[in-house]
Amino acid sequence: MSIKPLFTATATATGGRNGHTEAQDHSIAADLSVPKAMGGPGKPGTTTPEHLFAAGYAACFGGALDYVAQQRKKSARNAAVTCSVTIGPRDAGGFGLMVKLHVKDASLSQSDLTDIAREAHEKICPYSHATRGNVPVEIVVEGA
């Protein structure tokens, strides 16, 4: 697969899961800590790579939803996308991720929102493309 580059985001993390990450342009910076549930200190005021991934996927999927809706002469601009990213040990060793996207928009019918979310996931969202075949993604839709 090849893409025509439009934008590149670059970030550097030092210290792994107990360190710091920051975008090259300083648009985002976060201190990291392993959560207590994973055996770490769970330091207050820190985040995890899973939180960062969830925030990015939610925002990207929301944009993909509205793009598809606009193609259909509708709007999903006010849709709320909640992304949950779960990490845990894999049967084959190492660790893996699971994702759940909860899409809510009372301005669209359940049927319309379901169709729009399916198309956004299958054809538009780059996070969905990146996870396909690698990370299980469940989509729950709550329309009017």
Image (cartoon, rainbow, N blue to C red):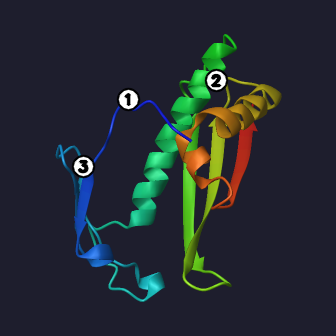
Q: Position of residue 79 (x, y in %)?
A: 58, 32
Dot 1 lies on which element?
loop
Q: In this rendered view, identify the residue nearer to me: 45 or 14.
A: 14
Tell me if mark 2 has few (under 14), some (14-19) or many (20+) residues whose alpha carbon lies within 10 angstroms of its own. Answer: many
Q: Residues within 10 Å of mark 3 (few under 14, many from 20)?
A: few
| Furthest residue in direction right, as rendered | 111
Q: Give the CA separation, mark 3 to mark 1.
A: 20 Å
Residue 58 makes an appearance in the image: yes
Q: Looking at the picture, does residue 125 appear above or below residue 10?
A: above
Quadrant where the N terminus lies? top right
x%, y% of residue 117?
Answer: 69, 35
Q: Amino acid at mark 3?
A: Ile
Question: Which quadrant, please, contains the C terminus?
Answer: top right
Q: Quadrant of residue 61?
A: top right
Identify which amino acid the numbered label 2 is placed on.
Val
Q: Which residue is mark 3?
A: 28
Residue situated furthest front in the rendering: 2
View extreme (top): residue: 73
Instruction: Judge by depth and name the residue closer to the eye, 56 or 47.
Output: 56
Q: 57 above or below 16? A: above
Residue wearing tag 1: 6
Q: Which residue is mark 2?
A: 68
Answer yes or no: is residue 30 visible. Answer: no
Residue 106 higher or lower than 96, as above or below: above
Q: Residue at x 72, y 39 (%)?
A: 142
Q: Nearer the viewer, mark 3 or mark 1?
A: 1
From this viewpoint, which residue is outermost toward the bottom? 39
Q: First in sequence: mark 3 or mark 1?
A: 1
Q: Secondary structure at mark 2?
A: helix
Please give left or right for residue 92 compared with residue 34 in the image: right
Mark 3, secondary structure of its residue: loop
